[in-house]
Each structure stands twice: as C-alpha cells, then as structure tokens.
Amino acid sequence: MTVLDIKGLHVEIEGKEILKGVNLTINTNEIHAIMGPNGTGKSTLAQAIMGHPKYEVTAGTVTLDGEDVLEMAVDERARAGIFLGMQYPSEITGVTNADFLRSAINAQREEGDEIPLMKFIRELDKKMEILEMDEDMATRYLNEGFSGGEKKRNEILQLTMLKPKFAILDEIDSGLDIDALKIVSKGINEMRGEDFGCLIITHYQRLLDYITPDHVHVMMQGKVVKSGGAELARKLEEQGYDWIKEELGIED
Ligand code: ADP
Ligand code: MG
Ligand code: MG
C-alpha cells in the first residue's frame, strides 16, 4: 500500500490565500471524491499537489509514503507515480498520440528498460478497445482537432497506459455526454486495485453513479469541511450544499 498524505495545506495564488489547511489521506486501493461549490479551491488543491508554479504552498505537507512531494520538481512527482488529468499541453503539433504516450511511459522507466515497441502496441490496442476509441486516434497528432469528449477519453487512455499510483482527476466529467461518461468511468474502474488510488474532483454527483467512491469529501472555503461515504454524494445531489453551511455555520 502507498499513502498520499496531505496535512494542513495552505496555498496562495498571487498573494491570496485559497487553501486554508486541507487534510486528506488517500491510500492506494481507495477512490476519493471531492465535491464542493465553485471557487472553493478544488482545482487549486490538484494544481498544488502537482506543483504548478503559480500555486504557492505557504504551510503544510504533502507526502508520498513519507517522501516530501513538495520538494520534488513536477516531472519527479509524475515519476513518483502521481498523475494529474490535464497535465499535458492541449495540443502538440508534430507528435502523434502514440509517440507521446510511449515517451511518457519511457520517461517513467529506467534508461535501458524502455517498453518494447510490440508490447506497447499490444497494450495500446487493448486499452483503446476498452475505451472504444477509433484506431486513428493513435496516429493523430496529440489533441489536435480532438473533440472535448475525445480529449477526456484520451486522458483516461494516458492514465491506463501510464498506470500511476495516484491519479487526480479534475472535472474529468465536465462536458461529457452520458455514453462518454460511461466509457470514461469504465476506464477508471479498470484501474481500481491494490496499486491504485484516485482523487476525483467533480462538481456533479453524476460521475459517482458509475464510479462508486470509497470516501466523499466536501470542500468549502479552502477546507475539507465534511467527509463521508458514497451516500454523502447522493445527499448532496438531492439537497445541495446549504445544509452543510447551516450545520457548520458558514456564511456565503
Ligand atoms: P474550484 O476548482 O473549487 O472551482 P479553484 O481552485 O479553481 O476553485 O479556485 C479557487 C479560488 O482561487 C477562486 O476564488 C478563484 O477565483 C481563485 N483562483 C483560481 N485560480 C486562480 C489564478 N490562476 N489566479 C488567481 N486566482 C485564481
Ligand atoms: Mg471551478
Ligand atoms: Mg475547479
């Protein structure tokens, strides 16, 4: 088991404090969902974990099995096994999707231990079939002319090919129609297991109809204010966030 541990995390953007002490522990073999109203710092949390330079950590720790993640450069974080959906440039002209994926996989491996081409192709074919992707998606240039749904599906392809220890998926469901949502969920569910932990950030409960989270957290005003099981997401869908605000005495 691997543990991603976030303790007392405070993050500022351009001098403004956005995260005000986030605590969250995610083990492999667990899927956590973070929900919450817009502008409460969910994406900020994802970006801070991944090391986006604009997000300044002013207090707190992020560790991966005790190793200080905040000390690591962005590529080291990826190599340590943390995957952030949306981390790739949206379009890279002249690099095919397959080439990009193969370099990303090899960048995670030791020199001299590159993935054999045939093995890579077999695996890519298999995953693309699971995700119901057109074969030509492999040879097209990365994200060039991909529709919104294709980009999201491609992100899940990256996830299933790179097999990180932890994935942080920020609004992977936004803009997906129901069929695409089911396929994306299938890809994430395929990853479930001993060696995989996931933090799903979503504004809507809908995705969680297809991926049953082990833990659900509500974020408000830069903090995790409530945690529960899958039933908490359903309650939020039915009743919104007001009851939590009342319970906690939070004013808008
Ligand atoms: P969420 O993902 O929960 O909707 P965000 O983390 O995107 O919330 O944003 C939290 C707060 O930080 C918001 O008030 C937003 O305006 C502010 N913010 C986010 N990104 C930036 C940025 N790049 N520059 C300045 N302010 C930002
Ligand atoms: Mg938002
Ligand atoms: Mg966001």
Image: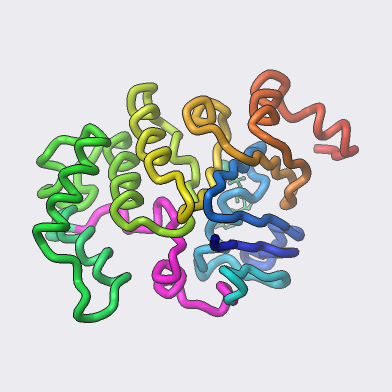
Q: Residue at x 58, y 66 (%)?
A: 55
Residue 234 x, y percent position in the rendering:
65, 24
Q: Residue at x 32, y 70 (%)?
A: 108
Residue 215 x, y percent position in the rendering:
64, 41
Q: Which residue, as the protein is rendered here, is positioned at the far top?
A: 238
Label count reads: 0
Residue 77 x, y percent position in the rendering:
46, 70
Tell which of 192 and 39 is nearer to you.
192
Tell which of 162 and 221 is nearer to you.
162
Query: Is residue 167 in sight in this rendering?
Result: no
Q: Residue at x 34, y 31 (%)?
A: 183
Residue 44 x, y percent position in the rendering:
59, 55
Task: For the C terminus, give its image quadrant.
Answer: top right
Note whether 17 is above or below 212 in the view shown: below
Colouring scheme applied when the structure was drawn = rainbow
Q: Quadrant of residue 130?
A: top left
Q: Quadrant of residue 110?
A: bottom left
Asked if residue 202 is among those painted magenta in the image, a careful observer would answer: no
Q: Quadrant of residue 181?
A: top left
Note whether 128 is above or below 20 in the view shown: above
The span shown in magenta is: 68-92
Residue 115 located left or right of residue 8: left
Residue 84 located left or right of residue 225: left
Query: Is residue 54 in sight in this rendering?
Result: yes
Q: Residue at x 61, y 54 (%)?
A: 26
Task: For the N terminus, give its image quadrant.
Answer: bottom right
